[in-house]
Image: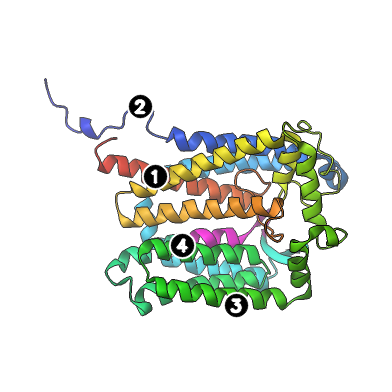
């Protein structure tokens, strides 16, 4: 037999994209396009004169997201190392621009978007990705001194805090809470001392309590969380109608397009509360399918982190997977009235270009880490 140079390094057919990760993601995106149309058609007809308005935009977002996924799959994940600080700096500039530039867009009492021509961009979603890359790079570089307060803990908290303060000014408590929990989780995995992490939990809890009580509407929202039916006419309105949607769905759902709550009863049915519409139209069976697809993605992300070829890849995969998992859990918990109402989308399902495109980018990066791990082990 004649040895062919480089033959062992060639990728076998079918390993270019991780099917176990790609399939549930594309399945969810497809379900999302259908459900965005179902949830938004009445609203789109009333506001824009076309029931296809949000459907067409979501289809474009999905196409762009798939292209970004393919691009990130082929960009070596190690290329993000030197971009750690520039990405954080760009995130700070974009978040500041939301608050202090004419490009900031205010809707529903919050300033969370930048208007760049025909495109509205949500910088808090980008800030999450920037923080993950920064923490992965910084913790790998400081691995030998990660247990020191001034090296392994304080710099990471300062960067996270700068991003979180700007997000809280929008105001967007949900996104800021995700940043804090994400930083805590990545530092925990990286080996930062538990005494520092435990103390920070207590401090963050006190700051969170002060923030909730510093505004009347936030305090009322917290009160309505404990008994949404008592406040069903105002602060508990979203939670009660969301629960009604799940209750109406039963085991098998009312059928696609037959939701009652989306007809101007449930606010934001195609974004923050699309899970409620899914529960009403697809029932418990549909909800369980959605949860199973998410579990497959999170399980695969954890496996990729475990088999990453280096610490940077491991931390990056953990951060990306944890960010997805946190957003999924918080959105579902809000829809089920298990958490106070927050303006967070459901990954791959909710209407919104920034969230969908950046989450698809995260999947592409995970695929690149997985492929690099297989190459390092001589499997691909």
Q: Which residue is mark 2?
A: 13
Labelled disc at residue 303: 1
Tell me the element at label 3. helix
User: In terms of image quadrants, where is residue 38?
Assistant: top right
- In three-dimensional space, the C-alpha distance between marks 3 and 1, rounded to whole angstroms, equals 35 Å
For the residue pair 180 and 46, the one nearer the viewer reads as 180
Which numbered disc flags the more N-terminal residue, 2 or 4?
2
For the residue pair 327 and 129, the one nearer the viewer reads as 327
Mark yes or no: residue 182 visible: yes
* Side of 294 relative to 226 (left or right): left
Judged by depth in the image, the label closer to the viewer, 3 or 1, is 3
Q: Which residue is mark 3?
A: 206
Judged by depth in the image, the label closer to the viewer, 1 or 2, is 1
Q: Which residue is mark 4?
A: 185
Relative image position of residue 375 (x, y in whole percent): 28, 40
Tell me the element at label 4. helix
Relative image position of residue 186 (x, y in whole percent): 43, 62
For the residue pair 172 and 149, the one nearer the viewer reads as 149
> Which residues are the magenta region?
115-130
């Amino acid at each position: 037999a004649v040895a062919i140079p480089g033959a062992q390094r060639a990728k076998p057919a079918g390993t270019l994209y991780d099917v176990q990760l790609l399939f549930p993601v594309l399945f969810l995106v497809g379900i999302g396009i259908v459900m965005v149309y179902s949830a938004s058609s009445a609203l789109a007809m009333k506001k824009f004169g076309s029931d296809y308005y949000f459907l067409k935009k979501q289809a474009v977002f999905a196409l762009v997201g798939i292209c970004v996924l393919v691009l990130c799959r082929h960009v070596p994940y190690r290329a993000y190392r030197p971009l750690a600080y520039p990405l954080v700096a760009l995130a700070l500039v974009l978040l500041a621009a939301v608050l202090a530039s004419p490009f900031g867009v205010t809707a529903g009492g919050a300033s969370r978007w930048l208007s760049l021509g025909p495109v509205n961009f949500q910088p808090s979603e980008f800030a999450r990705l920037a923080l993950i890359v920064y923490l992965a790079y910084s913790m790998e570089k400081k691995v030998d001194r990660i247990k020191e307060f001034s090296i392994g803990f304080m710099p990471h908290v300062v960067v996270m805090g700068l991003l979180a303060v700007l997000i809280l000014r929008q105001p967007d408590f949900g996104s800021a809470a995700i940043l804090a929990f994400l930083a805590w989780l990545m530092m925990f995995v990286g080996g930062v001392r538990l005494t520092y992490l435990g103390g920070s939990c207590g401090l963050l809890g006190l700051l969170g309590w002060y923030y909730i009580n510093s505004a009347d509407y936030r305090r009322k929202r917290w009160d309505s969380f404990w008994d949404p039916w008592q406040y069903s006419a105002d602060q508990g309105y979203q939670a009660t109608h969301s629960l009604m949607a799940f209750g109406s769905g039963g085991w098998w759902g009312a059928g696609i397009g037959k939701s009652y709550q989306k007809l101007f009863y449930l606010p934001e049915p195609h974004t923050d509360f699309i899970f409620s519409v899914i529960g009403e139209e697809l029932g418990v069976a549909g909800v369980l399918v959605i949860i199973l697809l998410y579990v497959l993605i999170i399980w695969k992300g954890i496996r990729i982190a475990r088999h990453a070829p280096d610490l940077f890849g491991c931390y990056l995969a953990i951060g990306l997977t944890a960010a997805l998992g946190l957003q999924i859990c918080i959105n579902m918990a809000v829809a089920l009235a298990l958490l106070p109402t927050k303006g967070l989308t459901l990954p791959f399902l909710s209407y919104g270009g920034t969230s969908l495109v950046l989450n698809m980018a995260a999947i592409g990066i995970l695929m690149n880490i997985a492929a690099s791990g297989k190459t390092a082990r001589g499997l691909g």
